[in-house]
Amino acid sequence: MRISVLTTRNDQFEFLRKAGRLTALSVLLLAGFGLASCTNLTGDSFSSSSLKSSWVKPDDPQEKMGAKEHPLVLAKYGGEYSDSNAEKLIALVVGRLVSVSLDPARVYKITLLNSPKVNAFALPGGYLYVTRGLLALANDSSELAAVIAHEMAHVSSNHAILRQEKISSIAIGKEVVDDVLGGNLAGKVALAANKIRLSNFSKDQELQADAVSIRMIGRAGFDPFASARFLKTMSKFRQLNSRKSSKITNGSFLSSHPTTPERVELAKRHARFFGAPGFGERERERYLKGISGLLYGNTTEEGFVRGQTFTHAGLGIRFVAPKGFAIHNQPHAVTLTGPSDIATRFDAAVLSKRKSLAGYLKSGWINGLINETIREETVNGLPAATALAAADGWRFRIQVIRNGEQLYRFITAAPQSNLQVSAVSEKITGSLHVLSEREIGALSPLRIKIVTASKRDTLGSLAKQMRGVGNRVKLFKVLNSLSAGAKVQAGQQYKIVTDLGS
């Protein structure tokens, strides 16, 4: 959850979404329950000089299309991510690919996005995007080259333009953006955010881009089998994360680039044009050096999920989800989903000290409010107020907690037949803890760390070094593209996830 400026809004929202019955829940209970956020927008690409020269031609008619969507992409994906080593790594790969592309005269604007999502996509005019989440998942330069070449193939083949001719679309692109760009975005970006929709390419266009990209990376001297390898890694990553959330890949490279066995086999067939596996460079050591220290997962501004605990430095709090609940840190709120279709949403707002909490609950932003249930109380020493509401077969417990002018808002929902709403709500809010300055200063985001295996190391011992993530052994295997039964090799480098401060 990204916090900068917190304000209340008057628009209604669809409260909670969850796999199963809760997915259909569209009870418009609250008005203005979304958290306003602020994303810094910039017009520059990478800070490294090698990539500043990669601007598209100013007289390119397609450049205007890409330029129009560029600030929206930045807003959607948390802005640009600055890392000189990663930027140089991408620049070297792009330079080799441009020289063998179908349109070597075209220049590209490459942007590294500050998002943990595994994603890459293209806009007309040579705008290419790669997330830091994708860099963390790839294992060598050839795999990164396969992804970037795929996007370059979409640009050179004018797939976005062809797609636009078939459908009515405001935003041109290759990924479906299901979320609405929310928050305190300035002026036109805030208005356009409600309309952005980056369209999926067709299956034929994806397969065509696969074929073109594999020929490109092979001609550039990279391992042409990298495409099939990364497709398999993405498939494993999808399976691992699907256990956490049915929507984990929504709006991502994983959803718009299906990793079916047939597609993997077709990628291998194209690669065999260059010979048997072993042809071309992988550049694993250079790649791992380039992503060492790369931010993994959410930023400090968005808050951290560590096991069952959510911590947010900007709000200065942490709270704990009950056992059996999953925490989903979304752009504008945090949702906790549990068994029997019960779920809680948390966000924050600003409320003047002159206004009472009971009056705030009565101010009209809650539909179905049961006025006689409003109670003012304290939660862990903080002023608070609670109320119950009911609508369309659902029961709700709303709790607001004041900390100065900062207001923490929790709402728990369950089907009318579920009587655990109050108990669950009280357990979550009862765990609320205001962080001290020392605790805030001790918070560190997770990063990619490169370790070299010793003779004594095993897969388990290296995975044990990971911190802040679940399923450590499985994630270690996926991050390092290790197959079932694989063993670590002494002297080889591997990726782990840690806070680096431990």
Image: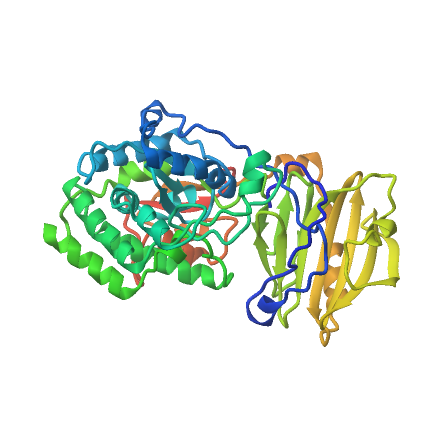
Tell me if residue 323 can be seen. yes
Tell me if residue 431 can be seen. no
Taking 460 as reference, is 213 above or below it?
above
Taking 114 as reference, is 339 above or below it?
below
Taking 295 as reference, is 204 above or below it?
below
Q: Quadrant of residue 124?
A: top left
Front residue (pair 201, 289): 201
Name the spot of residue 351 as percent of width and height, x first. Answer: 79, 41
Front residue (pair 221, 22): 22
Side of 48 where 300 appears, left or right: right
Side of 134 where 306 appears, left or right: right
| Direction bottom: furthest residue | 417
Q: Quadrant of residue 418?
A: bottom right
Q: Quadrant of residue 28?
A: bottom right
Name the spot of residue 455 as percent of width and height, x first. Answer: 30, 48
Side of 461 where 30 appears, left or right: right
Image label count: 0
> Residue, x 27% and y 50% (percent of image)?
489
Name the spot of residue 462 as percent of width and height, x first. Answer: 40, 50
Name the spot of residue 414 as percent of width and height, x first. Answer: 69, 69
Front residue (pair 255, 240): 255
